[in-house]
Amino acid sequence: MRDGKGQAMGWWTKHASGIEAMAALVTACVAIAALVGAKIQLDHADLVQREQSARDAYRAHLALAATRPEFARPIDACQLVQSDEGGAYIAFVDHLLYSAEQMLAVEEGWSLTFLDQLAPHQDYLCSLEGILPLEDGVAALMDRFTDAYCPVEPVCGPGG
């Protein structure tokens, strides 16, 4: 007659391969869960970083607009493009579009804000239709802008 300890050892011995297989399966599941968790954490950190970067770009644009109000609300964008300040004004508008691209890529609800920000640059932007290489979010924004603000014949002529 066997004692309880011998019976337990016999059970473990008899089922050792099944237990090892189950342990390997559990280990694999834990490893997969850890990989998925790491991926989720990295994706979240990336999103937080992109959101912060977008906010920083927009904040920088607002600071630029405060220091260069003649660029933020130009009296005559066509004339401004042709002036000695033309390069700086074009860079200002490019920065606005970059800010829009960054913000629209990470947060919804900014389209109306950027349409409002782009409106004073109507004459210049409408003269660029189809010239600018744009990302999807900003391309959709510019399509809305063009439909709402651009006349059939641009005021400035091609490129400013």
Image: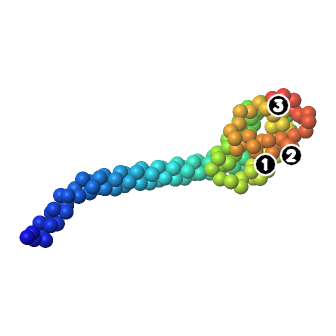
Query: Nearest the camera: 76 or 149?
Result: 149
Q: CA distance from mark 2 to mark 1?
A: 9 Å
Q: Are the two marked residues, 2 and 1, in contact with CB atoms closer than 8 angstroms?
A: yes
Q: Secondary structure at mark 1?
A: helix
Q: Amino acid at mark 3?
A: Gly
Query: Nearest the camera: 99 or 132?
Result: 132
Q: Amino acid at mark 1?
A: Leu
Q: Earlier in the sequence, mark 2 or mark 1?
A: 1
Q: Residue at x 86, y 45 (%)?
A: 148
- Residue corresponding to mark 2: 148
Q: Secondary structure at mark 2?
A: helix
Q: Residues within 10 Å of mark 3 (few under 14, many from 20)?
A: many
Q: Residue at x 19, y 63 (%)?
A: 11
- Residue corresponding to mark 1: 115
Q: Are the two marked residues, 2 and 3, in contact with CB atoms closer than 8 angstroms?
A: no
Q: Is residue 82 left or right of residue 104?
A: right
Q: Earlier in the sequence, mark 2 or mark 3?
A: 2
Q: CA distance from mark 3 to mark 1?
A: 20 Å
- Residue corresponding to mark 3: 160
